[in-house]
Amino acid sequence: MNLSNYLVLSVLLFSIGATTVLVRRNAIIVFMGVELMLNAANLAFVTFARMHGDLTGQVVAFFVMVVAAAEVVVGLAIIVAIYRTRRSASVDDVNLLKS
Amino acid sequence: MTTMLHAGSVLAGIAEAGRTTTGEEVLFWILAPVMVLAALGLIFARRTVYAALSVILVMVSLAVLYVAQEAPFLGIVQVIVYTGAVMMLFLFVLMLVGVDVADTFADTLGAHRWVAALFGIGLGAVLISVVLRAADIAPQGLTAANEGGNPSGVARIIFGDYVITLQVVGILLITAAVGAIVLTHKERLVAKVGQRERADARIAAGEVLTPLPAPGVYARSNAMDVPALGPDGRPLEHSVSRVLRIRGQQRSVAEVHAHLDPGTGTGSTPPERTITGEEQVR
Amino acid sequence: MTNALGGLAAVLPTAVDPAMAVTSAGGAIDVAWLLVALPALGAAVLLLAGRRSDRWGHLLGVAMPVASFVVAAAIWVQMLGLSGAERVAELDLGTWLSAGTFTVDLGVRVDPLSMTFVLLVTFVGSLIHVYSIAYMEHDPNRRRFFAYLNLFVAAMLLLVLADSYVLLFVGWEGVGLASYLLIGFWEHERPNAVAAKKAFVTNRVGDLGLLTAIMAMGLLFGTTDIGLVNRGAESAGEGWATVLGLLLLLAACGKSAQFPLQAWLGDAMAGPTPVSALIHAATMVTAGVYLVVRSGGIYDAAPTALLVVSIVGAITLLYGAIVGCAKDDIKKTLAASTMSQIGYMMLAAGLGPIGYAFAIFHLLTHGFFKAGLFLGAGSVMHGMNDQVDMRRFGGLATSMKVTWVTMALGWLAIIGVPPFSGFWSKDKIVESAYAVADGQGWQPWVLGTVALVGVGITAFYMSRLFFMTFHGTRRWDDGHGVPGDAGETADVQHPHESPALMTWPMILLAVGSAVLGGALAVGGAFTTWLEPVTGHAEHHEPVLPVPVIMTATFVLLLAGAFLAWRQYAAAPVAVVPPRGSLLTRAARRDLFQDTVNEALLMRPGQYLTRSLVFGDRTVVDGAVTGVAAGTAGSGELLRRLQTGFVRSYALQMVVGIVALVAVVLAVRI
């Protein structure tokens, strides 16, 4: 089997994650879409590491995970903070950028 | 059964020199469709919890793929960090925000959804062509790199070339934790009210300090709706539950008295004087 | 003539051979960077700590240059133990700038020339710092003053220690900045601020020369390392060397207040007196001479540029001397004398390798007696309620004994009375001016005579200053009116000696003025010391016999001093300046330098600016407003894209990414 199959799978997951961010309005689901995109990137990293015979790719994936964890903590805190004031978790309700 | 065996052999001794074994191939072709379907669930699931569960499925499958790809350390970390910590955090927040917040699919932004879907597919298409174009490398495999065990190999790089990055990421994590605390922190606008303050306030307001008197007790009827009688023989209106009073389900002493059968003296001793609730204070 | 210069130039490369130039000497030389770092640290601490350090700021400010001096002395002692060629050390502190093949290293160059400067700057600078403690005692911003002084010293040390022209430029600009801050230290008074601005702008003109020269060096040699550039200057051809030499001369003129960029120096007296002492003796105006001598390799390859250097020096020499004769302001007289003395140094530097050592020698002795004179002037002002008009002094010798004696030593030194310092250095310059080249042509006669006449005029105006201040009749009001002045009355003065913190630096400098020149001149000690840098110069016979020159010098000196004595000590001095001759009146106005600058540069510049403003309003602004209107219109259209929904922004991003990747793919196919 060609290793590029893994890459194709990674791309598919990434695109699905991106589409999720675009079409869903629930902030938590949008956020999960972002996580999916990060995971897809990680899969690509791991595959590349195997292709090049270099563990650095895995290390980078590891760092991505750590950063993603930090991001989740802050992101969810923001969602909770917004939910507290607006009683809504929909990204469309946060549209102060307009006007 | 054979598939299981194959999967087992895959996890046990994975391909050398980057070439995939048949076992790995089978594993991939089983997991990949499952993962894509689960990921699609993220787009189409109506309930948030289902979406979260399908993401968990994708992540666990990814962990298996990592192990298959000669990255057992990452596979374990994936399970622990993502499915164990991150997704659980997601579920917690879901519970906090409200599980039953269902997403309506009617989009407020007109054709936005269709354009988004179109470009999502377009993104996949262009990226796949990029990948197919770029990934034409003969895989080298990690057998040499993993010689001393994959975790120690990864550790050597993390604590060697990337030790500064590691420190910075550590700082980032602490900052994130502090940030989350700050974000979810509620500012206390008034002084904290404790037991002592409550007691003081009650005394200052001149309220009744003792428990309210229990409602009247006539064993032969529902006593909760009848006021108790004070030492002076007058009914104590506030002894009846506030709810009953508001609902108008309260009965006066006289009303109850009228229903009592004066002849039968069983149970409690009927009062010798007539109790109507309107006696003079003695 | 060309032959002779070529021969001299051939000496130079052997003196600074690359193999010998870089020595890892070890010992104190290895910490030469401390020289710059200490005062820089002092400046940083004082500026950053702000008012919190008001109480102890001046002590730190003094400690830093003193510490620098200690380090310098240690290095010097170590260097004395080495042989001539080993005294040149380059300390590499790493790469500073790296742009492709062009790199600039951060390095310190320790050799006899730079160490001479370092010792002068740190020693005289430290004394001036000590003096300033008392002088600025009542100034609320004394701490800031010390911060700037430290910055000044640090910048000057960086300038002289730099091993590349780029790093030198940093120090050069640092000196300019510090002088700007210090000249305008009392900036709440408009003339001071204007003077600071004038110094700054004039210096920028010179900086343009240095900057252009550095760029040209990068182009020609691919490096700005001082050693490499000077060794390779000959390979660039005489044309380029001349261009470089003239550009560097422009820079030197700006910093050293040489003709035609001399206008700022007189106005720079607006700063507190210790600043003037620092600028004139140690840190600023000497930088130009340093630059010329340091770039000896370039000038050796460009005889024309060298000639221009000496001509500029000669013009400035006379210019400063003439202006000095007419000024009544004690500080401005001293400023004019600095200009003139620096002219001497430039003249000597323009004589080629034979003159380099004498230029630096005169610079060194001048540093001592000029600092002493300025501090003395500050002391006089301190005792006279900041009066600067010499016509309001007179007979102060009895009231301020220490100041009188120290200034007397400085005065004898500057006019060149043997055996004081100035005699040894100035006499050599006059002698070498007559000895230029092979003794052919007009150069030795003209340059030598100018230097000779300069000695006479210097004797006159410095004696004038001295006698007007300390001798003759009292022209200030001691509470019983001014004798011989029926008209206006000045403020009542109570002249008194300055505190010990001010007198001790003056005494030390006076001792230096008296003996330093002789001590260093014995057996050509100083010339030998500088030889690793300037190269060994063969001695040329002057066109006039040496005894004749010396006699002429001495006669002119005595004549000048006597004239001054007769006019300003023996005869009464008018309190109100007399109308004077045409030359006097011109000299009082600095020989119309400001008028010329205004007519030639300022007014055309203003007209140019005005026409540019007009063009800007109609053409440029028109185009700009048109564009603005167009932008606003298209913005109105684009506004509809801004829905305020995060998702639509994300969609726009995805659309962009897809388009981008698609384009890249299409191009690669």
Image (cartoon, rainbow, N blue to C red):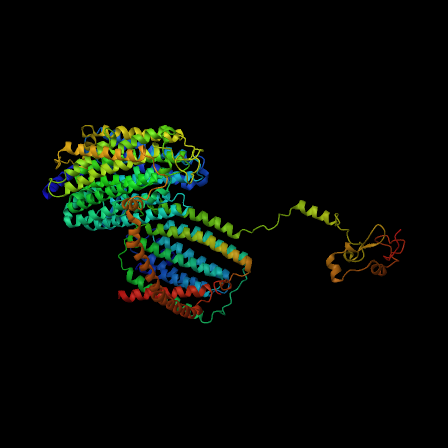
The quarter holding residue C503 reads: top left
Q: Nearer the viewer, residue C58 or B245?
A: C58
> Is C264 or B241 nearer to us in this picture?
C264
Q: Is residue C471 left or right of residue C294?
A: right
Q: Nearer the viewer, residue B89 or C542?
A: C542
x, y percent for residue C395: 36, 31
For residue C600, what is the image quadrant?
Answer: bottom left
Q: Where is B125 relative to B155, above or below?
A: below
Q: Is residue B79 above or below residue C514?
A: below
The N terminus of chain B lies in quadrant: bottom left
Q: Quadrant of residue B276?
A: bottom right
Q: Is residue B230 left or right of residue B4?
A: right
Q: As drawn, which residue projects farthest toward the left?
A: C3
* Residue C1 to residue B245: above or below: above
Q: How many marks?
A: 0
- Rendered residue at 29%/48% (across/down): C593
Q: From the viewer's perspective, is C537 left or right of B121?
A: left
| Res C90 visible | no
- Give the x, y percent position of residue B129: 31, 64
Front position in the image: C187 or C70: C187
- Image location (x, y in percent) of residue C446: 16, 42
Residue B49 visible from this viewpoint:
yes
Residue C197 in the image: x percent, y percent?
35, 48
